[in-house]
Image (tube, rainbow, N blue to C red):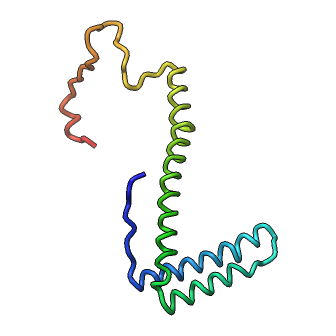
């Protein structure tokens, strides 16, 4: 995993992080998930968000360790998600497309030599008439 530096935030940045984080905790764990699963409305997200929001309003530097921990978690998740997404893209899109083209006998790179000229891969260019240059697009 490459070493990426996590930027240090000033008081305003930490305040914004704390308020945003508390809003996301409340909306996700306090409202959305209980509503989706028809569960009881928990109080812990509201308490956690209230403590986090009050800390971010009163003394934002206290959120610096939480910010660093969250950003490290984000870097690890980004590393894993990139590999998972690229693996799925390769196995779901590129491999079936290549196999279908191979079965269909299509050679888009023209890797096979033509039967008439066994000496070169070169494709001879075609001479264009003058009217082609009048309207190139």
**Could you tell whether 118 is left or right of 98 in the image?**
left
On the image, the x and y values in percent for residue 83 come to 50, 47
On the image, the x and y values in percent for residue 121 come to 28, 17
On the image, the x and y values in percent for residue 37 come to 79, 67
Residue in front for this viewpoint, 32 or 29: 29
**Could you tell whether 101 is left or right of 23 in the image?**
left
118, above or below 46, in the image = above
Residue in front for this viewpoint, 119 or 63: 63
Q: Residue at x 64, y 81 (%)?
A: 48
Q: Residue at x 55, y 42 (%)?
A: 88
73, above or below 49, in the image = above
Q: How many marks?
A: 0
Q: Residue at x 59, y 80 (%)?
A: 22
Quarter of the image for residue 55 reads bottom right
108, above or below 4, in the image = above
| Image quadrant where one finds the C terminus | top left
Q: Residue at x 50, y 63 (%)?
A: 74
Considering every residue shown, the one lying at the far bottom of the view is: 58
Residue in front for this viewpoint, 100 or 28: 28
On the image, the x and y values in percent for residue 123 come to 27, 20
**Could you tell whether 37 is left or right of 73 in the image?**
right
């Amino acid at each position: 995993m490459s070493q990426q530096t996590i930027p240090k935030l000033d008081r305003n940045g930490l305040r914004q992080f704390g308020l945003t984080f508390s809003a996301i905790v409340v909306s996700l764990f306090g409202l959305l998930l209980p509503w989706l699963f028809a569960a009881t409305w928990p109080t812990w997200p509201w308490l956690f968000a209230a403590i986090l929001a009050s800390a971010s309003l009163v003394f934002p530097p206290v959120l610096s360790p939480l910010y660093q921990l969250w950003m490290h978690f984000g870097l690890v998740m980004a590393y894993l998600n990139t590999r998972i997404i690229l693996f799925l893209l390769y196995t779901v899109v590129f491999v079936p497309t290549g196999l279908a083209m191979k079965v269909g006998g299509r050679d888009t790179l023209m890797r096979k030599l033509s039967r008439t000229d066994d000496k070169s891969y070169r494709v001879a260019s075609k001479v264009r008439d003058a009217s082609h240059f009048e309207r190139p697009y």
